Image: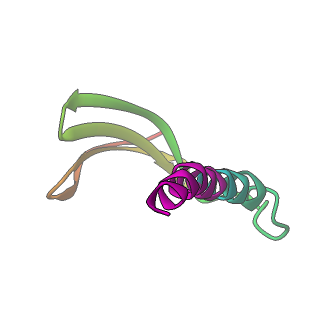
């Protein structure tokens, strides 16, 4: 009786985990194709660079201007504004 339970658990647990991961992957792929979200965005991330394990630098473009920001666990800090 106990072996049947362990066998069912050994089969069903990876199956359920696989279905969960597969559905999340499909959701992410299909989310890009939703109509109405294909418009031009005002903000775009041009480049990111990891400075240290908890800090990342990012170049953002907003209304034709480039912004250099630092992203850390404590928040986001504007470092420099690059004008066109």
Which quarter of the picture shows residue 76? bottom left
In this rendering, would 78 be left or right of 19?
left
What residue is at 21 percent from the left and 28 percent from the top?
51
Residue 61 x/y as whole percent? 50, 46
Q: Nearer the viewer, residue 45 or 10?
A: 10
Residue 11 highlighted magenta (yes or no)? yes
How many numbered tags mark residues here? 0
Residue 19 x/y as whole percent? 66, 56
Q: Residue furthest front?
A: 1
Q: Nearer the viewer, residue 38 or 59?
A: 38
Q: Nearer the viewer, residue 57 or 62?
A: 57
What residue is at 60 percent from the left and 50 percent from the top?
11
The correct choice, above or below, for 71 with respect to 16 in the image is above
Residue 7 x/y as whole percent? 54, 51
What residue is at 52 percent from the left and 49 percent from the top?
10
Residue 20 x/y as whole percent? 60, 58
Q: Residue furthest bottom?
A: 36
The correct choice, above or below, for 56 with respect to 16 in the image is above
Question: What segment is highlighted magenta in the picture?
Answer: 1-20
What colouring style does the render use?
rainbow
In this rendering, would 66 be left or right of 74?
right
- Main SS class of the magenta portion in the image: helix
């Amino acid at each position: 009786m106990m072996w049947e339970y362990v066998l069912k658990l050994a089969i069903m647990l990876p199956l359920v985990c696989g279905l969960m991961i597969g559905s999340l992957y499909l959701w992410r792929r299909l989310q890009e194709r939703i109509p109405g979200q294909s418009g031009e965005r005002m903000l775009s991330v041009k480049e990111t660079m990891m400075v240290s394990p908890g800090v990342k630098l990012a170049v953002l473009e907003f209304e034709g201007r480039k912004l250099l920001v630092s992203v850390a666990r404590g928040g986001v800090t504007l470092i420099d504004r690059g004008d066109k």
